[in-house]
Amino acid sequence: MAEFHEQLKKAMQIRNMSQGELCKRTGIPKSAMSQYMSGKFRPKQTRTFLIAEALRVNESWLMGFEQEPMDKKPLPKNLIPLKKIRFVPILGQIACGKPILAEQNYEGTVMVPEHVNATFALRCKGDSMIDANIQNGDIVFIQETPVVENGEIAAVVIGDEATLKKVYYQNHTVTLLPANSAYEPLVFKKEEINDIRICGKAVAVLRYIQ
């Protein structure tokens, strides 16, 4: 059975990772890491896990059980690994139909993949965007921005109310177009444009299967 400090140094060499970088990734003080590397002390389970994660090795291998492979075992075929995630706030509901009061009530948080550039999320209400595959009850992720391109779906505040629509600019007119022929577009001209404000564009949709 190999010693922890031997496995640690072997993994650091294979991963080409310095002590300083390992400390940075794990949050473990350099003084403690030096003791682990020298073999004077072995880390507790929590720190062993952090080190194994940073070096992408099995904990059991790192602890000296040589029968285990160094690399983490692949997941079973029926499982897929989740990408890195983060949390964004859900700020109440937004109308997919007639505008509703834009009360930004904090409802908690929702997970979103790290690559999705979202600032916050809103819960959709109504069916005016069903042809854009946005349904009642969906959570739509919004990237905060005051301007969107023609045809992009945006969260728009009209006075004290909010709605989710496609936005089109033409001359001195802004048209908020639903994605459902049962609803009429909302058209704003000249000074009326001052009554609307774009909060951000929709970048992703989450739907829970019931």
Image (cartoon, helix red, strand yellow):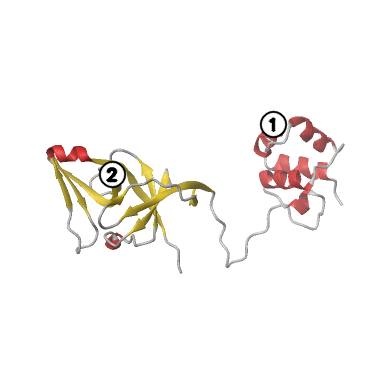
- Along the viewing direction, whichever of 192 and 71 lies nearer the viewer: 192
Residue 114 visible somewhere in the drawing: no
| Residue 127 coordinates in the image, percent (x, y) | 29, 62
Q: At x 59% / y 66%, what residue is drawn?
A: 77
Number of numbered discs visible in the structure rendering: 2
Q: Secondary structure at mark 2?
A: loop
Instruction: Please indicate whether residue 180 sits to the left or right of residue 121 in the image.
Output: left
Q: Residue furthest bottom?
A: 210
Location of residue 98 with respect to 150 vertically, above or below: below
Residue position marked by numbered label 2 in the rendering: 160
Left or right: 138 as drawn, with respect to 78: left
With 4 as the anchor, is 146 left or right in this view?
A: left
Q: Nearer the viewer, mark 2 or mark 1?
A: 2
Q: Residue at x 26, y 60 (%)?
A: 128
Cα separation between marks 2 and 1: 52 Å
Label 1 crowd (10 A; few <14 / some 14-19 / many >=20): few
The amino acid beneath tag 2 is: Asp
Tags 2 and 1 in contact by the CB under 8 Å rule?
no
The answer to whether residue 134 shows anywhere in this view is yes
Which secondary structure, mark 1? helix
- Give the residue displayed 70% in from the left and 35% down from the top: 23
Q: Nearer the viewer, residue 131 or 104?
A: 104
The amino acid marked with disc number 1 is Gly
Expressed as whole percent of the image width and height from the top left, the position of residue 109 reads 49, 49
The disc at residue 172 is none
Looking at the image, tell me whether mark 2 or mark 1 is earlier in sequence order. Answer: 1
Q: How far across and how far down the image is residue 205, in percent?
A: 39, 56
Task: Identify the residue position indicated by label 1 in the image.
Answer: 20
Q: Quadrant of residue 181?
A: bottom left
Toward which corner of the image does residue 19 lie, by quadrant?
A: top right
**In the image, residue 194 lies at what x, y percent?**
20, 37
